[in-house]
Image (tube, helix red, strand yellow):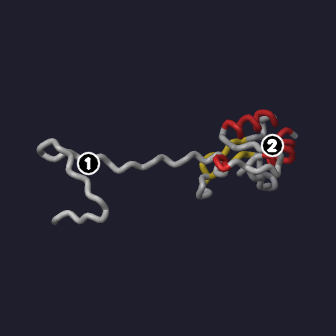
Amino acid sequence: PQVKAFVTQDIPFYHNLEMKHLPGADPELVLLSLRYEELERIPLSDMTREEINQLVQELGFYRKETPDAPVPEEFQFAPAKSLPILLPPPQAPTADGKTPPKHDKEEHPDL
């Protein structure tokens, strides 16, 4: 009954949280990546409605004031974490201990 109350009364308030009914299956929260790859399954059967609400908020799901309320831009992809910024690897110093000069994309160094 606790999970059913969460599903029917609370899910509409959460952005990017959807319910999919699977007859006969135990209720669980399935976390997916942006590419819809399964990341984790969390069983919900033994949790109270309050515990489930706390869990989804701790996971970063945005709870709206009303089911139809707009979602602020910074939460559009919540609870997805931003991807780490990939920096180019540092250049190894040359034999004389100096870092080789960097070249612009348009520049073609002599071969």
Residue 81: x and y in percent read 57, 45
- Assign the C terminus to one quadrant of the image: bottom left
Amino acid carrying label 2: it is Glu
Q: Is residue 89 left or right of residue 68?
A: left
> Marks 2/1: CA distance?
50 Å
Residue beneath the point at 62% across and 46% down: 40
Q: Is residue 94 something one can see in this rendering? A: yes
In the image, residue 51 above or below residue 97: above
Which one is in front, 107 or 71? 107
Instruction: From the image, tell me which residue sits under label 2.
Output: 65
- Dividing the picture into quadrants, the one containing residue 35 is bottom right
* Category of crowding for the residue at label 1, using alpha-carbon neighbours closer than 10 angstroms: few (below 14), some (14–19), many (at least 20): few
Residue ID at (23%, 65%): 108
Residue pictured at 16% horizontal, 65% vertical: 110
Q: Are marks 2 and 1 in contact (CB under 8 Å)?
A: no
SS for callout 2: loop
In the picture, the disc for residue 91 is: 1
Residue drawn 76% across the image and 33% down it: 51
- In depth, the one of 61 and 30 nearer the eye is 61
Q: Reply above or below: 36 against 46.
A: below
Q: Amino acid at mark 1?
A: Gln
Q: Nearer the viewer, residue 50 or 70?
A: 70
